[in-house]
Image (cartoon, rainbow, N blue to C red):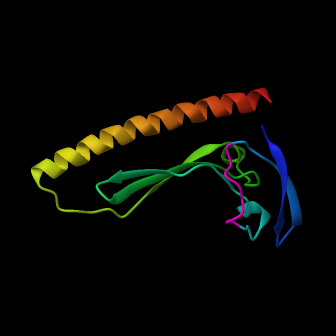
Amino acid sequence: MNRTITLSTLDHGPVSLPEPGWCTGHANRVPGYRIDLTHTGAEHTFAFASDTLLVAMLSQDPFVTDPERRRPRLYVEQTGYSASLDPAEVRQLAAALTVHAMHLRTLADQLTTLRAEEGRQ
């Protein structure tokens, strides 16, 4: 369920908008401009050993000009991970990537459901 929030911006002053139920809030992300307002969901970290490979989270930019980008999307960021691995470590990395691929597919399924629900509101 969405609730309405109001955030201050430099170019439009206070802006009120619905906040999706999956958004984790805006306390730590103060926008400068209205176009910079972004809803973000819980962060999913994809790691190998003690290194982060990817970070993913639901996101939505309600004031961008491209209507498709106003819909919820999955923000995915790759890190700069690099390493020289022995054969066993390569197999471990491959196994971790397989698990991460399954998790990404699950997030894609959740996003599909969320977008379908958005269309019904």
User: Which quadrant, please, contains the C terminus?
Assistant: top right
Q: Is residue 89 above or below residue 31?
A: above
- Image side of residue 59 versus residue 13, left or right: left
Instruction: Please give the name of the residue rendered at 83% of the width and 67% of the height, measured from the top-left corner.
Output: 8
Compare residues 69 and 78 and report the one nearer the observer. 78
Q: Position of residue 36 (x, y in %)?
A: 71, 63
The correct choice, above or below, for 44 with respect to 11 in the image is above
In this rendering, position of residue 87 left or right of residue 46 = left
- Location of residue 58 in the rendering, given as x and y in whole percent from the top left corner: 60, 46
User: In front here: 7 or 70?
Assistant: 7
Left or right of 16? Residue 104 is: left
| Residue sitting at the far left | 87
Provide residue 27's location: percent of width, then percent of height. Answer: 72, 63
The range drawn in magenta is 22-29
Position above or below: 30 against 120? below
Magenta portion: prevailing SS class: loop
Q: Dividing the image into 4 quarters, which one contains the N terminus?
A: top right
Q: Is residue 94 magenta?
A: no
Drawn side of residue 69 relative to residue 9, left or right: left
**What residue is rendered at 38% in x and 58% in y?**
52
What residue is drawn where x is 31% and y is 38%? 98
Give the quarter of the image for residue 120.
top right
Instruction: Give the total number of marks visible in the rendering.
Output: 0
Residue 4 image point, x, y percent = 85, 49
Residue beneath the point at 48% across and 33% down? 106
Instruction: Tell me the quarter of the picture where residue 50 sits.
Output: bottom left
